[in-house]
Image: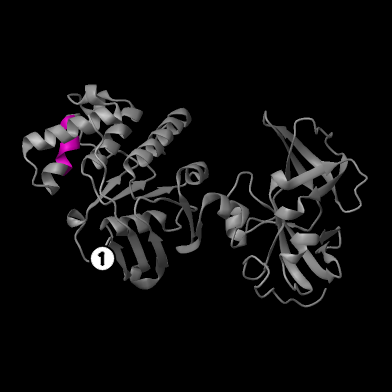
């Protein structure tokens, strides 16, 4: 029995906007996004960032305040949800409890196609076998486990052969082990069927591992879109740097001073000094003296007991073994900072298990210079060569 390939289509959002309460609440703020045929895009962001509202507008369940939605060559902005060739997989499965699994999977075909009953049944059987639920077709949803229900929900979407698949946090009701299994299952289906999909999730691991591209939203605005590795290594602003990754990126308030051979970064409270040299210093271009936020991920922080002249002094607050590594929670003084009003969180170093300083030990912290980021403290935007660096009054 061959696997039927789904029809693919591109998806384009052009200035998509959604307001509530007469414009006092902007849930989605003029989003522009193009998704290619067969591309799997994950959308992630904090609660209330607009990701589910965006998905509902694509599905036709919410009407945009302004902007356009195109699927393939067709503008579907004003097309009723039932007439859009999309299939949506929900967090709560959305199965009809009184219908059999066979009837649940066939329902969308009966409503949206002119297939005969025999053709519908053939397609349902074929899809159920592909999903590994062929022996459950005569059961009802209350007889199934959570994982089986999610397979039915996926199969019901696949059987329609839509242009675009929409996933609204489909795995959030499953336990951790089953989420991993279903994540692998969805990735397998993506590979086999070449589906065009938008996958909304609050789980960063899902977003980073499943998508060809990842889209980060905050306050209704698109912050960054790109390949997961690119977004992780080159965040476009401080929010993305702090949101993507666990533990999140460390931030320090610094003053930058250009040197003949690099850039000197001094803690905002003069509690440390650190020199960037070579290629990484040149990545920041003709940086001007002024205030910045230094960003560095925990895995790019090294800790020693001394001897490094270009290092930041710190005190060990907590040592947290996680099996493969140790997390060191460090006190670097008053220059550490958070983002988006989070205050000053711990500065974390992710080190090997043989690095085990005692609580209260004074250590030296150094950075992998190739992974140092600088952000504008006012706008949060990343500072790189070729861009205007923020201008601040000399300290």
Question: In the depicted view, which residue is nearer to us: 208 or 57?
Answer: 208
Look at the image and name its color scheme. Answer: one colour
190 is within the stretch colored magenta? no
Q: Quadrant of residue 292?
A: bottom right
**Residue drawn at x 53%, y 50% as measured from the top left:** 228
Horizontal placement of 50 versus 315: left or right?
left
Q: Secondary structure at mark 1?
A: loop
Q: Residue 62: give x, y in percent of width and height.
A: 28, 60
Q: Residue 253: give x, y in percent of width and height.
A: 75, 62
Assign the N terminus to one quadrant of the image: top left
**Residue drawn at x 77%, y 73% as measured from the top left:** 290
Horizontal placement of 35 versus 231: left or right?
left
Above or below residue 96? Residue 132 is: above
| Main SS of residues in magenta | helix
Q: Where is mark 1, residue-wise?
A: 77
104 is within the stretch colored magenta? yes
Q: Which residues are magenta?
A: 102-108
| Extreme residue in the front direction | 2
Note whether residue 99 is visible.
no
Q: Residue 47: give x, y in percent of width and height.
A: 47, 52
């Amino acid at each position: 029995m061959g696997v039927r390939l789904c029809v693919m289509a591109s998806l384009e959002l052009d200035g998509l906007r959604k307001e509530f309460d007469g414009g006092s609440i902007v849930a989605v703020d003029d989003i522009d996004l193009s998704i290619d045929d067969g591309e799997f895009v994950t959308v992630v962001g904090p609660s209330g960032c607009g990701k589910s509202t965006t998905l509902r507008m694509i599905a036709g369940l919410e009407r945009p305040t302004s902007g356009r939605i195109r699927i393939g060559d067709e503008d579907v902005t004003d097309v009723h949800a039932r007439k859009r060739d999309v299939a949506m997989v929900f967090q709560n499965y959305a199965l009809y409890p009184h219908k059999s699994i066979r009837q649940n999977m066939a329902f969308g075909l009966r409503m949206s196609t002119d297939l005969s009953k025999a053709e519908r049944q053939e397609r349902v059987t074929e899809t159920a076998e592909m999903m590994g639920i062929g022996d459950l077709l005569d059961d009802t949803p209350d007889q199934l486990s959570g994982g089986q229900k999610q397979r039915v929900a996926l199969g019901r979407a696949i059987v329609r052969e839509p242009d675009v698949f929409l996933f609204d946090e489909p795995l959030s009701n499953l336990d951790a082990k089953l989420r991993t299994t279903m994540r692998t299952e969805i990735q397998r289906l993506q590979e086999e069927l070449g589906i065009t999909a938008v996958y909304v999730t609050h789980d960063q691991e899902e977003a980073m591992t499943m998508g060809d591209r990842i889209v980060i939203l905050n306050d209704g605005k698109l912050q960054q879109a790109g390949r997961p590795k690119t977004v992780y290594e080159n965040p476009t602003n401080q929010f993305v740097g702090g949101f993507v990754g666990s533990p999140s990126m460390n931030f320090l308030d610094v003053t930058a001073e250009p040197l003949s051979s690099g850039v000197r970064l001094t803690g905002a409270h003069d509690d440390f000094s650190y020199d960037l040299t070579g290629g990484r210093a040149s990545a920041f271009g003709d940086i001007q003296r002024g205030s910045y936020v230094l960003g560095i991920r925990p895995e790019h922080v090294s800790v020693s007991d001394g001897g490094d002249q270009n290092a930041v002094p710190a005190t060990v607050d907590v040592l947290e073994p996680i099996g493969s590594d140790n997390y060191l929670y460090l006190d670097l003084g008053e220059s550490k900072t958070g983002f988006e009003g989070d205050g000053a969180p711990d500065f974390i170093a992710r080190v090997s298990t043989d690095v085990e300083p005692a609580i209260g030990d004074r250590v030296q912290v150094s950075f992998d210079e190739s992974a140092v980021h600088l952000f504008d403290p006012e706008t949060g935007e990343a500072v790189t060569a070729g861009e205007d660096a923020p201008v601040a009054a000399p300290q």
